[in-house]
Image (cartoon, grey):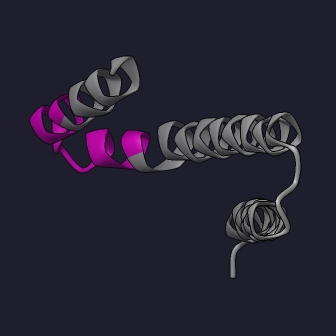
Amino acid sequence: MKPEHKALDTRLASIEGHIKGIRKMVEDGTYCVDVLKQTYAVERALQKFEAELLRGHLATCVPNGFKEGRNEAMIQELSEVFELARK
């Protein structure tokens, strides 16, 4: 596994652990506000994961696509990602 993929996998494992913790909190009847605090933490962790994944894509895959002459496809892909991020 590439180092950048390992870092992403580590982030996902952490998020997965938080989700399992939230599930247990709900099962145990933990106070709602405490559960919400954890869900907000997971949302922020996912945003950081997305930012890192996008950074890597912009640094490697996109330049490679342009070098390979797939300009139109790269522009379309970036437009789609931009639209998804705005929703």
Magenta span: helix, strand or loop, mainly? helix
Residue 30 picture location, percent across and down = 87, 54
Residue situated furthest left in the rendering = 72
Q: Nearer the viewer, residue 32 or 45?
A: 32
Is 75 part of what is drawn in magenta? yes
Tell me how many marks there are: 0
Residue 78 picture location, percent across and down = 29, 30
Specify start and end residues of the magenta stretch as a single range: 62-76
Q: Is residue 29 above or below residue 45?
A: below
Q: Nearer the viewer, residue 30 or 65?
A: 30
Q: Quadrant of the C terminus?
A: top left
Residue 13 picture location, percent across and down = 77, 71
Q: Is residue 38 above or below residue 44?
A: below
Residue situated furthest top in the rendering = 86
Query: In which quadrant of the rendered view does residue 63 lie?
Result: top left
Compared across the picture, whether 86 is left or right of 17 comes to left
Q: Quadrant of the N terminus?
A: bottom right
Compared across the picture, whether 71 is left or right of 12 comes to left
Is 67 part of what is drawn in magenta? yes
Q: Give the residue drawn at x 71%, y 70%.
A: 9
Q: Give the residue drawn at x 66%, y 42%.
A: 52
Q: Is residue 80 above or below residue 49?
A: above
Q: Nearer the viewer, residue 81 or 56?
A: 81
Q: Nearer the viewer, residue 54 or 37?
A: 37
Residue 31 picture location, percent across and down = 87, 44
Query: In which quadrant of the rendered view does residue 45 lie?
Result: top right
